[in-house]
Image: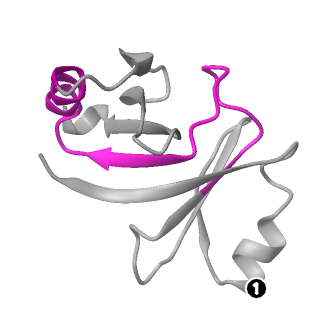
Amino acid sequence: MAAARIVPNRYTGDPKAGAGFFNDVLGLETAMAMDFITIYRSAAQPMAQISILSEDPSGLRPAYSVGVDDVDAVHARAIEAGHEIVYALRDEPWGVRRFFVRDPLGDIANIVQNKDRV
């Protein structure tokens, strides 16, 4: 299992409101924009990203996302280690397979794999 990226998740009423700052000031490109999320990334380092969300469709607020190459294996290890799964493993309609786990510091982590890599 390899983690390909770790992305902080920030919450606001309008995920597109920061576009001027992230695009124009920081020089990031918009990697994805949906009604509830906008992801900005560096063109030079595409795995350097930040997600701006109005809300997560789960109703929870994961503090960060970890993109992995085998979400099922990470899920099994998290359960085996006794970590609290706060959002069950599932396929989402926007093309990812994910689950949420509470980390040892008390934050919620969104563990995610793009379905085209499953």
Q: Nearer the viewer, residue 101 or 4?
A: 101
Q: Nearer the viewer, residue 10 or 32?
A: 10
Residue drawn at point x = 32 percent, y = 38 percent? 114
Q: Total marks drawn?
A: 1
Where, quadrant-wise, is the N terminus in this rendering? top left
Relative to 92, residue 20 above or below: below
- The image position of residue 64, as x and y in percent, is 51, 48
- The image position of residue 83, as x and y in percent, is 32, 26
Residue drawn at point x = 40 percent, y = 41 percent? 104
Relative to 7, residue 56 above or below: above
Residue drawn at point x = 37 percent, y = 28 percent? 98
Element on which disc 1 rests? helix
Relative to 19, residue 55 above or below: above
- The image position of residue 22, as x and y in percent, is 72, 73
Q: Magenta segment range?
A: 51-80
Residue drawn at point x = 50 percent, y = 76 percent? 42
User: How would you rate the neighbour count of disc 1 (Cα within 10 Å): few for under 14, some for 14-19, many for 20 or more?
Assistant: few
Q: Is residue 104 left or right of residue 26?
A: left
Magenta stretch: residue 53 in it? yes
Q: Is residue 98 left or right of residue 14?
A: left
Colouring chosen for the image of the structure: one colour
Q: Nearer the viewer, residue 26 or 65?
A: 65
Magenta stretch: residue 34 in it? no
Query: For mark 1, what is the residue?
Result: 25
Q: Is residue 14 left or right of residue 89?
A: right
Q: Nearer the viewer, residue 112 or 30?
A: 112
Amino acid tagged 1: Val
Relative to 62, residue 97 above or below: above
- The image position of residue 76, as x and y in percent, is 17, 23
Where, quadrant-wise, is the C terminus in this rendering? top left
